[in-house]
Amino acid sequence: MTQTTTAATCSSGTLVGGLCTQAPVTGPPPSSNVSVSIAQSAVINSQTVGVDLRTSGPGSITVVNAGTINVFGATALYGIRANALGSGNVSVTNNGQIGTSAVGIFGSTTTGSVTLANTGTIISGAQGMIAQSTTGAIAMANSGTVTAGSGNAALSANSSSGSINIANNIGGVIHSSTNSPADLVIQATQTIPGSIVVTNAGTLTGTIQLQGSSGQTIFTNSNSGVWTTGGTSIVAGTFNNQGSVNFAIPAGGSQLIINGPYAGGGQFYMNIYPQNKADNVTIKGSSISGVTVVNVANQGPIAPFTISPILISAPNVSPAAVSNAFTIGTLSNFGNTQVALAQQPNSAGLALALVTASNFPTPVIITAAQSIGFQSSDVVMDRMGELRRNKNNPSGPIALGYDGALGYAKMPVKADPIGPTLKQPEIGPTIRPAAWIKGFGDYQQQNNAIFSYNFGGATFSNDLSYHQTIGGGLVGGDLLINRFTSANDALIVGVMGGYISSNIDLQATPTNLRFSGGTFGVYATYLNGPWFVDTMAKLDMLALTINAPGVAQSDDGKNVDLAANVGYKFDLPNRWYVEPTGGIEYVRTTFDQPNLAVPGAVPLADGDAVRLRGGARVGTDWVSNGVRVEPSVAGFLYDNVKVSNGALFTGTGGGSGLSLPTDQGKVREEIQVAVNAFDLKSGLSGFLRVDTRFGEDLFGIGGRGGLRYQW
């Protein structure tokens, strides 16, 4: 029997075999085939069932709706119900609109097949489409929009042993009324193992439950498919993913359980959350193929040196066999943190977690702070060198505090027969104060500073090449104590203070570091004939600011600097001299908040450096118009023979700490060119020096100048 309704409205009734009637379906169902077509212009309004068809025996049911069906009310059951109670087949196609507070389409048979298709719109308060067959095949297809009530499956298929085939085609949209990714949208169940094949080529929002034989259940998310899921989804068999699986953002993370093999080629969009939570894919099958790109969004603050919960687990698959099956794609909201997807060694099979490490300039920070200490202490050492050369090259009484007999050559006289027998009077120590001021600037470039390390099963690499500028000014005062213990020795003691500023830019990342603050210290030189010993102790009080992507940080640091130097001056003919020297210097750098491995911060570490330096200075001097001029050239080798830049605590799973790179054992060269000028009448003197350093991927150049006055 074939019927077509073209009625504009069928109000408050039930369409039976194409006829609009006020009575519900009663009596025995027919055993013949029933076919109903609802025209596009037809509107059916009902409070129970919009279209209700039943057959028995071999009778089949075919329904094609192009019109509008509205079923609402307390007794609402179905928009369309097609129930073949025997072996007949059921076919329902919706090309129009179905709106109901109950089930959109219900198709059922005992041993026949059920085919449900939607190219129009179904908006339901319960399930969108339900297909049931005891032993027959079920096919469901959607190219339109199916909206189910929250908590109900949009597409539901149940068969004891018949095959189930569900397709959300290109252009198809399936979701719940709240569009919640946690709502169940596709459910397929077989009690006796058979095949379940589900394909998504459209847009699917919600969870799926495919419960059948693991060997015959296949879910395919094709390359045009976009599946957004939250909560827990289960695929009893194979999952083929060439499209996108977007894990939504519930509080505890989403989970996809695949009980069979996994074939990749598409993308996962996953999340990690605070309180050590993350989305998870568990693959229980024994094979993984293809390459899946894993994109990860950070939904909360994350600290460097963190290992997330397992994102992808495959306990029955060897990690070595699928080492490239999952790769990192787009990362969101990780700031300046480096991220890797790494196998976790203590987990069975393949177990990939997200491992974060700081894209940190920590070693640069420590080395740069130590460079500030070394360079500023060198300015103080220069001051002591000037005083030594003053003392050992007397050319005028005012400048040097010597009496005329020591300051000038004696006039030739006749032999004195009495003088040699006279005892010279003892002369005590003399003290002369002096004050000085100096300014200095320095540029240093460190290249090829690649730092690689392992953490959490992943290897990370940082390019720590950088440029550093240092500048500052120092002032000080000292006392020259001649004849300290004998006629041949002297002691110089002094204090100094000043301001230092340094700017550091990393070459590989837009990271800027800045140190600034005061420096204070004391120094002393002891001379005995040509021998000399220099000592110095100072404290740098430095404020540190760090600006990098996702980081705006500040901290206070300190340099404790101790230095000692010993040398010998050889006088050469024609007022030339050579002055070999060697020394040791120790710098201890500390920060108020070390190991600050928290979100949005660069972890810091304390460090120590011991530097040995040796070389010689060659110079001469002359006097012109009451000014003694002393040019000199010096060459040195230096090496940080012992550097301990501490370790960063790396948190859960990271062991006790991460040792930081240093420049220990890198021998470098330094060349200095200097000139001193001493006004022998006024006690005023000036100083200029330029220097360069090079070796082991380092280049530096600096300059300094200053004035001093001696009373």
Image (cartoon, rainbow, N blue to C red):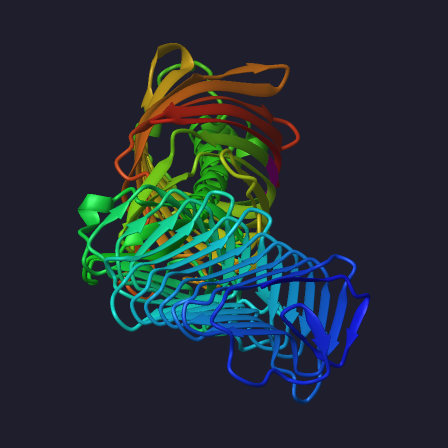
**x, y (%) of residue 672?**
45, 23
**x, y (%) of residue 393?**
45, 26
Is there any visible trace of residue 313 in the rendered image? yes
Residue at x 52%, y 23% (from the top left corner): 690
Farthest residue to the right: give it. Answer: 8
Q: Indicate left or right for 95 with 341 as reference.
A: right
Q: Indicate left or right for 8 with 417 as reference.
A: right
Main SS, magenta residues = strand
Q: Is residue 368 magenta?
A: no
**x, y (%) of residue 64?**
62, 59
Is there any visible trace of residue 644 in the rendered image? no
- Quarter of the image where one finds residue 118: bottom right
Closer to us: 154 or 487:
154
Closer to us: 32 or 402:
32
How many numbered discs, if any? 0
- Quarter of the image where one finds residue 526: top left
What segment is highlighted magenta in the picture? 435-439
Q: Is residue 436 magenta?
A: yes
Farthest residue to the top: give it. Answer: 574
**Is residue 629 depicted above or below 504 in this figure?**
above
